[in-house]
Amino acid sequence: MQTATIRPARLFTVEEANATLPLVKAITLDLQRLAQDLLERQQRLDALGKGRKADQSDPYQDEVEQIQADLETDSKQLEMYVEELRELGAEPKGLAEGLVDFPAMIDGRIVYLCWKLGESEIRHWHEIDAGFSSRQPLVEEIAAGPSDAHGPEFHDEA
């Protein structure tokens, strides 16, 4: 994938992305919990259904159908959380891991600022066509942004 074809609705500075983190954290925490819960319930449902035929004589059929309906409802809620993040301009990536990317411009190209649930601020970035495993630490010049007249606000803890 070429980054030139990527046209995000919004580009963030590190400061702007960090400013959204309180809301992004809340949504991502809910999203992560629900994604993990859905996965576990689907796995239990799959295990319950192995070797069984669904018919009216099955005493658990009503319960199975209710679980399936609940999974469908919760899947729609999961989609709503994803859409909330996208409306903010962020891109949820690893739902169960709590990964969120923010489109940004670095050195004249569009990249992603990379954040993971549990991190206090955005400190990494990666290419558009790369993922979490390829993320790199931000340097002070990038974190400060070109319009920051007060100097860099990012401090590496190394």
Image (cartoon, helix red, strand yellow):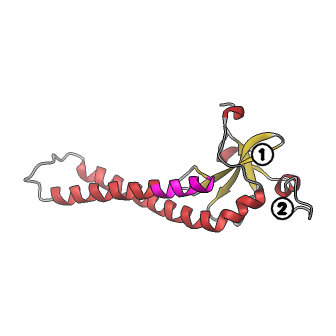
Please name the residue shown 72% across and 33% down the image.
Answer: 4
Relative to 78, 19 lies left or right: right
Mark nearest the camera among 2 and 1 is 1
Give the numbered dot on residue 156. Answer: 2
Residue 94 in view, yes or no: yes
Estimate how packed mark 1 is, as few (under 14), some (14 to 19) or many (20 or more) residues with alpha carbons within 10 Å: some
Q: Of helix, strand and loop, which mostly describes the magenta segment?
A: helix
Please name the residue shown 62% across and 54% down the image.
Answer: 100
Q: Secondary structure at mark 1?
A: strand
Relative to 73, 128 lies left or right: right
Report, in whole angstroms, how far the alpha carbon at label 2 lies from the one at label 1: 20 Å
The residue at which mark 1 appears reads as 105
Which three-letter amino acid code belongs to the residue tagged 1?
A: Met
Quadrant in the picture for the C terminus: bottom right
Q: Nearer the viewer, residue 101 or 119?
A: 101
Image x and y of residue 18, in percent:
72, 62
Relative to 63, 158 lies left or right: right
Please name the residue shown 48% across and 63% down the image.
Answer: 33
Please name the residue shown 28% across and 54% down the image.
Answer: 68
Is 47 located above or below residue 128 in the figure? below
Q: Residue furthest front?
A: 9
What is the magenta range? 80-90
Which quadrant of the figure has residue 1? top right
Q: Secondary structure at mark 2?
A: loop
Image x and y of residue 144, in percent:
85, 58
Does the magenta run of residues contain 87? Answer: yes
